[in-house]
Image (tube, grey):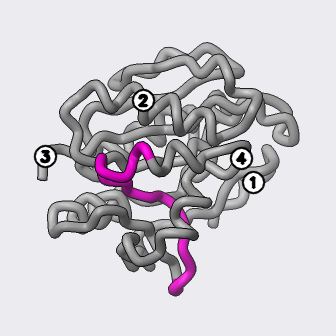
Amino acid sequence: MGHVSGLVLAAGAGRRFGGPKALARLNGVRLVDRAVAILARGGCTDLLVVAGAAPLVVPGAEVVDNPEWQSGMGSSLVAGLAHLAAGPSSAVVVLLVDTPWVGDRAVARLVAAHAAGAVAAQATYAGTPGQPVLLGREVWDDVAGLAVGDQGARGWLRTHRELVTAVACDGTGEDRDVDRPGDLISPP
């Protein structure tokens, strides 16, 4: 199956948040560094962060700049997939920088689903699809074609449910996102 890359989408300006969420800290650790660590502990290699609103230096990860970041998350996903397409990855786990409570065990379950033959996989919590998602290389072009605005992979995932393996991730963490600075003080 090859190895699975990790991709952190971290290009947004965080207008409602009051600044780029990638730079915000939870327990003293920047959200972008936390996301990279979650992916690494979950078994991902070739870690990539897509930046945009704020320049980022992220130890342990390559950073690619998305000059189109203002158009939404979709352009960041497209930029990340295009960059990874030049490498040997057979799949990528996509993690949003503002979901710091996703557990590395959720990532590991997605990686295991890919090793077992899943073309795409999505974490579920109490049966509800959530974050993160795994996308096999064979679907990257199709996903990129539908990634517009703030949709990211959502459009592709909805229209290709038959290709998406639901991976139960209850008890591995939580995919709750950070919308306001106060969210970082209230644990899940």
Judged from the image, the secondary structure of the residue bearing numbered disc 4 is loop
**In the image shown, does 150 or 93 lie closer to the viewer?**
150
Question: In the image, which residues are magenta?
Answer: 126-141
Question: In this image, 111 relative to 187: left or right?
Answer: left
Say which element carries label 2: helix
Mark in the foreground, 4 or 1: 4
> Which badge, 3 or 2, comes first in the chain's sequence?
3
Q: As rendered, which of 28 and 104 lies closer to the eye?
A: 104
- Residue under the image location 37 percent in, 52 percent down: 139
Residue designated by label 1 = 183
Picture coordinates of residue 185 (x, y %)? 72, 52
* Residue 41 rendering spot, x and y as whole percentages: 28, 47
Q: How far across and down, in percent of the image, does residue 51 sit?
A: 58, 24
> Which amino acid type is marked by label 3?
Gly
- Residue type for callout 1: Asp
Q: Nearer the viewer, mark 3 or mark 2?
A: 2
